[in-house]
Amino acid sequence: MQPKRVLVALAGTSADPDIIRLVASIAKPAKAQAIGIHVIEVRWNLPLDAVMEQELDRGEELLESAKKIAEQAGLALETELLQARDAAAAIVDTAVERKCDLIALAMPFRKRLGRTYVGRTVQNVYVNAPCAVLAYRQEETK
């Protein structure tokens, strides 16, 4: 696969550095543009443009950290902080608007009721994205 534009969805989990490095290994040889986004989900009882200082500060820190990790991997990462009702819809919409041909997401290893758990956001992006989706799951820590 030789993507031209890769959207990296960053959730602020321990898996984010892994997905950034993985995207760098894909994007650099293809000379692809990489865009990192973090979506702040706004509850329905708040206006969509509500100022949520704590979440905004955390999102900005997360994106700055992502840029540093990308730089260390030799990748220029453009970043954007979004607010939306649903993270998956915002990720898919951004990929469409930016004409991305790959969406990369990461998830930490989690189990629920004894089974590996894939979150709602990853599932919805996987199902609704019009482009290729790379879902990276961390390995189980023992």
Image (spheres, rainbow, N blue to C red):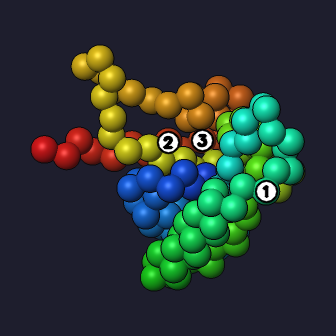
Q: CA distance from mark 1 to mark 2?
A: 30 Å
How far is disc 3 from disc 2 in space, using C-alphas?
6 Å
Kindly check if marks 3 and 2 are in contact, taking CB atoms under 8 A apart as contact.
yes
Asked whether residue 114 is in view, the answer is: yes
Q: Which residue is mark 3?
A: 133
Q: Nearer the viewer, mark 3 or mark 1?
A: 1
Q: Is residue 128 placed above or below 107 in the rendered structure?
A: above
Q: Amino acid at mark 2?
A: Ala
At horizontal 82% and vertical 50% (from top left) the residue drawn is: 50
Name the residue carrying label 2.
Answer: 135
Q: Residue at x 86, y 42 (%)?
A: 47
Residue 32 seen in render = no
Please tell me whether mark 2 sits on a helix, a strand or a loop.
strand
In the rendered structure, which disc, 3 or 1, sits on the residue that comes first in sequence? 1
Q: Which mark is residue 51?
A: 1
Place residue 85 in its image quadrant: top right
Q: Quadrant of residue 38?
A: bottom right
